[in-house]
Amino acid sequence: MTFGLPWMLLVLGFVPVLLGVYVWQLRRRRRQAVRFSNVALLRTAGVGARSWRRHVPVVLVLGALGLLGVASARPTVRADVPASSSTVILALDVSGSMCATDVLPNRLSAAQAAVRSFVQGQDGETKIGLVVFSGFAQLAVAPTTNRDELLAALDAVTTGRGTTIGSAILRSIDAIAELDPNVAPSDPVDEPTTDGPGIGGPTPTPRPTAGGPAGAAVDVAPEIIVLLTDGANTRGVTPSQAAEQAAARGVRVYPIGFGTTNPTQMACTRDQYGSFSVPSNRDLTGAGAGALGGRSFLVVDEPALRNVANKTGGTYFAATDADGLTKVLADLPKHVTVSEQDIDLSAAFGLLAALVLLTGLRLSIGRHRPL
């Protein structure tokens, strides 16, 4: 146990002083007491084997004062806090590849259904935020307990060009920083746009993070990021760079790689296409289809996602179909480790002091109640 205001513990010094004054008063009265020869009268007056009971109210009052002194020093303890009592940021990939039909009816529809089940399955105290990303990342819904707002935003997502996984992680960090003063916002970097640099573009100059010097211990934040993507980062800050910022702030990232390794065609609804317009049932099996930087951006970049999980203390999950994704999201709370937080016990000590004081007063009133 630690104390936010340890100097307030000096108040406890008054307790033994008051106890000493009480004992001195008892001895003084004893010396001045009149001696009675009638033993029966002494027993009737309460002097004898049970005379200790008259001291109980005083002891309780002094104990209450001691508890109030501890409460005023703002005691705190380190305790494990499960993620379910905090905040979850869902970062959802809405790039054009989510129109692939290797997961029926398509990846995006399957992801929306699985995320919907996840949101509806959380308790009412868990705050959930939604970040969507394609060519850029944006906070669609700030962390909230309003499930209707989340589901409405989820149903309204549209696809776009590009996949900015690193930017999605940074946006999620910023959403957490708005709620948790112990988590600093992400460091400024060259933000990706729909016309931004692709793979192999200029690397942003790193800046010192709020997490302290390299190698310093960082407290694990209770908030987590769940990142669902079906492809590879195509532009902007890399997932590895973003993961370093998350790790420096104690924010864990749980990436989920979604989809198969054999996407055949794209087929999203008109509402899902948004600004990413491609012909329906576009064939993706031709030479060079979906190729970028020597790899297919339609297939999950597992090494990059595993690296993100390892750097931040999270866990990587893979899901190749709708049922698998639903199961991963449903089981996620079982895999999320608890984090340590400082819990303020001032209110608890104050309440206990009030109960002890009321008990002492009740006993004192009962003892002096007229016959």
Image (spheres, helix red, strand yellow):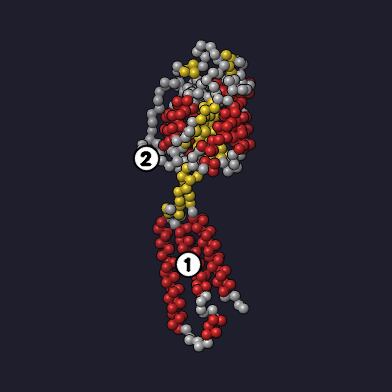
Q: Position of residue 296 (x, y in %)?
A: 49, 18
Q: Residue at x 49, y 31 (%)?
A: 316
Label 2 crowd (10 A; few <14 / some 14-19 / many >=20): few
**Which structural element holds mark 1?**
helix
Of the pair 331 and 111, the residue shown nearer to us: 331
Of the pair 299 and 180, the residue shown nearer to us: 299
Q: Position of residue 259 (x, y in %)?
A: 55, 23
Query: Of all residues shown, which one is farthest toward the top?
Result: 287
| Residue 216 circle label | 2
Query: Of all residues shown, which one is farthest toward the bottom?
Result: 37
Q: Residue at x 51, y 59 (%)?
A: 350
Asked if the residue under mark 1 is in contact with the one under mark 2, i.e. CB atoms within 8 Å, the reply is no
Find the distance from the CA under tag 2 to the CA under tag 1. Answer: 44 Å
Say which quadrant the C terminus sits in.
bottom right
In the drawing, does residue 269 fall left or right of residue 289? right
Q: Position of residue 333 (x, y in %)?
A: 54, 38
Label 1 crowd (10 A; few <14 / some 14-19 / many >=20): many
Q: Position of residue 304 (x, y in %)?
A: 45, 26
| Residue 62 circle label | 1
Q: Amino acid at mark 1?
A: Leu
Reading the chain from its start, which is encountered first: label 2 or label 1? 1
Q: Is residue 218 above or below residue 111?
A: below
Q: Would residue 184 be seen by someone viewing this image from the given angle?
A: no
Residue 9, quarter of the rendered image = bottom left
Q: Amino acid at mark 2?
A: Ala
| Residue 14 circle label | none
**Which structural element holds mark 2?**
loop
Q: Residue at x 55, y 84 (%)?
A: 40
Q: Residue at x 51, y 61 (%)?
A: 353
Q: Would residue 251 be seen by someone viewing this image from the given angle?
A: yes
